[in-house]
Amino acid sequence: MSGKTSFGDRVVAAGFAAGWKLVPLLPERPTAAVFRLLADRVWARRGKSVLRLESNLARVTGLEPGGRELRELARAGMRSYFRYFHEVFRLPSMSGAEILRRTHVIGAEHVHDTVAAGRGVVLALPHMGNWDEAGAWLVQAGHPFTTVAERLRPESLFRRYTAFRESLGMEVLPLTGGDGHTFAALAQRVRKGGVVCLPAERDLTNTGVEVRFFGAATKMPAGPPLLAVQTGAALLPATVYFVGDDWGIHIHEELPVPAEGTRQEKVAALAQGLAEVFEKGIAEHPEDWHMLQRLWLDDLPPGAAR
């Protein structure tokens, strides 16, 4: 991993280490209240991340930029985002029975039936709700899976996050800095009838696939649709959200690979299909969509690579 570790990176890593150690030892409701307070303070400062969240939510909802309703939605979004982190620290101490009991799933049969038939599954998710809890549910439901993690800074934080996810039953492969065979490993898992879960609504790199998303152009990762095209695995979009104090998961029907066209055309069609399913899920739960970065191509600074 290139680049020096900054003081800020070390502070964040120390904060996460303390969170995993201390939060499970404290009562849940008071610590949840503290995280909501922190979310409100970050929202009130209206820094770059909050303003970007507002801008993204304006596209999704059509609310007036700078208006009171949009600002309140952004506050709910920050509370949702901070709730995710609070739950990340508590998840390792939760029992499998509690995770199963508090997770309300629509479409679980799409995973169960596909795996039972001997086919692999590629679950593609946007950054919504608590995707780590959704992964914990999937493991407890009998489907341990493989995922890919972005390499965080500093390295100690990446290792802790990886260990956290592995403690929930996931196999975690690094997006970068590994042996260079991540896609081949994912293909191998699904060809053997396994399950792979991948984030799928943001990839502003040269390898991303351009799609229309809420009426404008953006890029999505090629990995999930390409796995389906090359291996015959079922591509299942999923959206994740909060339901009161519990969690919701909607696993949608398989997106079929087009019968005609080149591989590139098939991947593009599947990526657009994912975008359309994600649009519906995000529109239903906009406060639980944790997109605090630039997403649409026309939001990129002038001269940025597309």
Image (cartoon, grey):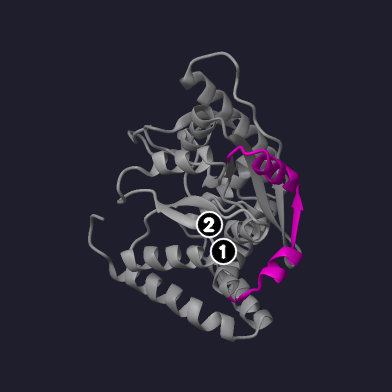
Please name the residue shown 67% across and 39% down the image: 114
**What kind of residue is marked 2?**
Val
The single residue placed furthest to the bottom in the displayed view is 26
Of pointers 1 and 2, the one earlier in the residue sequence? 1
**Image coords of residue 152 (percent x, y):** 37, 59
Q: Which residue is mark 1?
A: 43
Horizontal arrangement in the rendering, residue 54 relative to residue 111 (left or right)? left
Q: CA distance from mark 1 to mark 2?
A: 6 Å
Q: How many marks?
A: 2
Asked if the magenta segment contains residue 94, the reply would be: yes
Task: State the predominant SS element of the stretch in magenta.
Answer: helix
Please name the residue shown 62% across and 72% down the image: 36
**Image coords of residue 142 (percent x, y):** 65, 56
Q: Which residue is mark 2?
A: 50
The quarter of the rendered structure image containing the C terminus is top left
**Image coords of residue 263 (percent x, y):** 48, 20
- Front-lying residue, 160 or 143: 143
- Front-lying residue, 112 or 177: 112
Q: Residues within 10 Å of mark 1 (few under 14, many from 20)?
A: many
Q: Residues within 10 Å of mark 2 (few under 14, many from 20)?
A: many
